[in-house]
Image: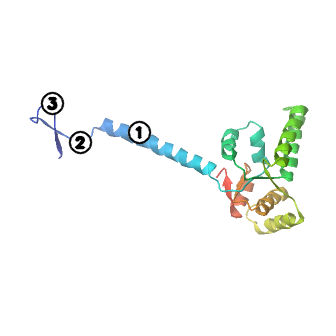
Amino acid sequence: MVFRISRRSGGACRSSILPSLRRSTRTAKIASRRRAGLLREQRAAYRIALPGPLYCDTSALLKLYVSEPGSDDFNRVVARREDVLVSDLVVTEVTSALARRLRQGTGTLEAARRMQHSILERLDGGGYQRVELTRAVHRRAEQFLLSLTETPLRAADALHLALAASGRALSMASFDGRLRRAARAAGLLTYPA
């Protein structure tokens, strides 16, 4: 047994150094909180440090303009990035989503037009890097459809993958689980992971 000498008694009294149960439980809780905090920091660093260029599909771009669950986190991911890739296909799909919201009565025509104009202005002004939908992109999408048979892809999803490949993206942001799985199978890092 290890002993320590009490300073108060002038060395006449010794007490064991065995940690009390209460103290070790409290220490374990603190250590656990620190580990959890460290994991949160590591996840945040991963989200922010996604290698670029970063291709955004429709579900991701909508999070930047419409307040939804996950919007704040994704806004932090793309803040001050200059390597965000967007295609005109995404703009058309966003406009379709806005029109659907109009039909459901959850938005106004004025707000939808402002949002569409804002996206186009940012794309045309260089805030996003445009990826063109070309004949070669279509052929690449067809290759993805035939090669990624484990993940059932829709034609638009394959086009998004091909656009990301065309823009030499290293990462893809998508809130569509099927597209994220296909992107990982194609060798891209994804957000959310």
Q: Nearer the viewer, mark 1 or mark 3?
A: 3
Distance Cα–Cα, label 3 vs label 2:
19 Å
Mark 2 packing: few (<14 Cα in 10 Å), some, or many (20+)?
Answer: few
Q: Residue furthest front?
A: 125
Q: Are marks 1 and 2 in contact (CB under 8 Å)?
A: no
Q: Nearer the viewer, residue 14 or 149?
A: 14
Q: Nearer the viewer, mark 1 or mark 2?
A: 1
How many marks the image carries: the answer is 3
Residue at the spot of label 1: 30
Residue name at image x 32 percent, y 37 percent: 23
Tell me where residue 12 appears, x and y as whole percent. 9, 35
Q: Is residue 116 above or below residue 184?
A: above
Residue at the spot of label 3: 8
Residue at the spot of label 2: 18
Q: Amino acid at mark 3?
A: Arg
Mark 3 packing: few (<14 Cα in 10 Å), some, or many (20+)?
Answer: few
Callout 2 secondary element: loop
Callout 3 secondary element: loop
The answer to which quarter of the image holds residue 167 is bottom right
Residue name at image x 32 percent, y 35 percent: 22
Q: Is residue 14 above or below residue 182?
A: above
Q: Amino acid at mark 1?
A: Ile
Q: Nearer the viewer, residue 102 or 51?
A: 51
